[in-house]
Image (cartoon, helix red, strand yellow):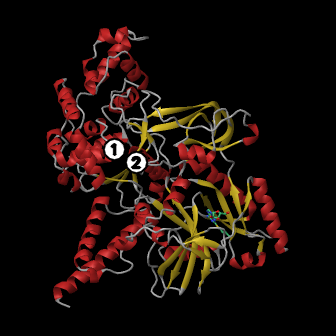
Amino acid sequence: MTSASKNLAARAAELRKLIEGHDYRYYVLDQPSISDFEYDKLFAELQKIELEHPKLVTATSPTQRVSGKALDSFQKAAHRTPMISLQNSYSPEDIMAFDERVKKFLKDDSEVEYFCEPKFDGLAMELIYENGLLARALTRGDGDVGEDVTNNVKTIRAVPLLLAAKKPPAIFEVRGEVIMFKDDFRELNEHQQEEGLQTFANPRNAAAGSVRQLDSNITASRPLRMFCYAPGVVDDSQAQTQLEFAQQLKDLGLPTSPISKVCKGADAAVAFYRDIENKRHTLPFDIDGVVIKVNSFELQKALGAIARSPRWASAAKFQPEQAQTTIEKIVVQVGRTGALTPVAVMTPVRVGGVSISHATLHNQDEINRKDVREHDTVIVQRAGDVIPEVVSVVLDKRPRDSKPFVIPNKCPACSNKTEQIAGEVVQRCTNVLCPAILKESLKHFVGRRAMNLDKVGDKLVEQFVDASLVTRFSDFYKITQPQLLELDRQGEKSADNILKSIEQSRRPTLARFIYALGMRFVGEQTAKILARQFRTIEALLEASEPDLIALDGVGEKVAHSLFQSLKSGPLKKEIERLQKCGVEIQAPEKMNPNGPLAGRSFVITGTLPMGRDEVKDLIEKNGGKCLASVTKNAHFVLAGEAAGSKLDKARDLNIKIIDWAEFNRLLTDT
Ligand code: IVH
């Protein structure tokens, strides 16, 4: 080996270590220490070296998480020991009864020590490490035989490809749950919707659907996580208890539950159950209960199992936040991109403290799968804590004359025939003059995250369109007071407020302006990338397709579609009209690396007097950095009203908590 290639080999090894370390800090410890941008740079450097010197690629290199080819089907594989399930309990009384059974079986009335942790709502998974290498990952399947989803699980960055041990055990099997965090789920669904792809009913379905992709490239694009919680076949483990096992997992670099507690006796376990139930909505992931396990492995062995579940553990589930109601009708809505979405309109019912009257039914496939029909009685629940979902139909209560619901192949707004584009699950109206698409595009344009005409709500946009006051974006800027006064229920004061809010929206940032145009595939993130890169709308309009493809974070498909949109005559004309109407697009401000916040990292929590994105912009403009979660690298936690669990963490880590006033002092300090 020449010294140059020796250096390269050393650099590649170093990059691998660095990237593995950052994956571990981000996904396992929840303490990232570099920005995504810096991480991507390291990754790109490694990829480049490996591409130019294929001999340097190792099997466990972070670049090898995605393998090339899609499968035709998953292979079946048997579990060495069955993946059994748990008995459920649903109340503190059930937990007490479980504890009584344990003590009775052990013929010992003294307090039992329980290891308690959340019951994650995801997809159970077995990881099999052979000599420290991730050899296989199997779904639970029927408990005896699962499916081999190794290629897909390798894409989950929380899962180490190599265990962190000098002398790893020959066989180390660990079970856990693959999940998706709530925020990641919301973002994924928004993205799926924008691209006309299938949306998911809840984080669990999204996680399960992502793991069961035959093409692991798709899985790689999904933000999956995993928490490990139980041993399978394990060689020479020293762990005597669940607690020690959890520590062993941590030592091996495996992700474990961020919340767990050893509880002495049933009362303490019940207290844990109640505490987690109260906290459940503040957690970043969905849970459906807690799992209470006898801590000692020796006692677990003594207790054994009945049928398919162990005597030593109980899944204490929370009362499901579900309710029964009836579907009054199913309406079909037309989105901004022409996508048709069926929505169940229901007799309002309270679920988990919130009144629910609408639930998306996603698409025809979902309607068929659940066989949801008009006038059905259904069970509804709040999925991912926010989105109402129809869980199932109460078939006994189905009216005799009911018929399956089929989404019409005509647009409900303009009656044009709809199309199903190859590879998409949704029907689309492709009529460029469709009034529903127009209304939705205008609503998007005025939206809070777009041009932010804050006094122009959805209802008003509809009124404007119905009265033919607005037929394109620029028309908002031509509206006059007499025109407003002619509209129904519009007084002088509110008319003035509306005009004022239109006036105030005339100076959008370039990113907001691009986002407001509503081009396909251009969400807020892409709009920001474009603004940062091109700096003026004119430069963006001049961009070539290769210019767009070259952008970090913009894929080929998006670049192609974006190029088509930018070249479209009507869009260009409309941008000109907007500028003629006095819309002045603000060039992105230059970051000031020597600003008053230089070198300081902030975590934002709670409600602040400014929108979160604006606060972020402000911090970055002044040289500071924003972190997503509280880690020891944060200098300040900026806390607004109703700040949540981040405050506890800040106190734990001894990080300075500041309020809005103090933050402003930092900004003006020189
Ligand atoms: S321990 C012997 N711990 O709940 C089984 N399970 O019916 C030991 N689950 O299939 C399982 N979170 O998929 C355990 N913290 C947790 C869990 C958990 C979720 C799932 C698991 C299992 C089901 C129980």
In terms of image quadrants, where is residue 97? bottom right
Q: Split into 4 quadrants, where in the image is the N terminus?
A: bottom left
In this rendered view, identify the residue nearer to me: 28 or 430: 430
* Beta carbon of the mark 2 residue lies under 8 A of ligand 1: no
* Beta carbon of the mark 1 residue lies under 8 A of ligand 1: no
Residue 108 visible within the image: no
Disc 2 is placed on an element classified as helix
The answer to whether the residue labelled 2 contacts the one labelled 1, judged by CB atoms less than 8 Å apart, is yes
- Amino acid residing under circle 2: His
User: Dot 2 surroundings within 10 Å: few (below 14), some, or many (20 or more)?
Assistant: some
Residue 410 visible within the image: yes
Q: Which residue is mark 1?
A: 523
* Total numbered badges shown on the rendered structure: 2
Give the image location of residue 312, x and y in percent.
74, 70
Q: Quadrant of ligand 1?
A: bottom right
- Amino acid residing under circle 1: Gly
Q: Which residue is mark 2?
A: 191
Instruction: Identify which residue is drawn at 51% across, 73% down.
Output: 250
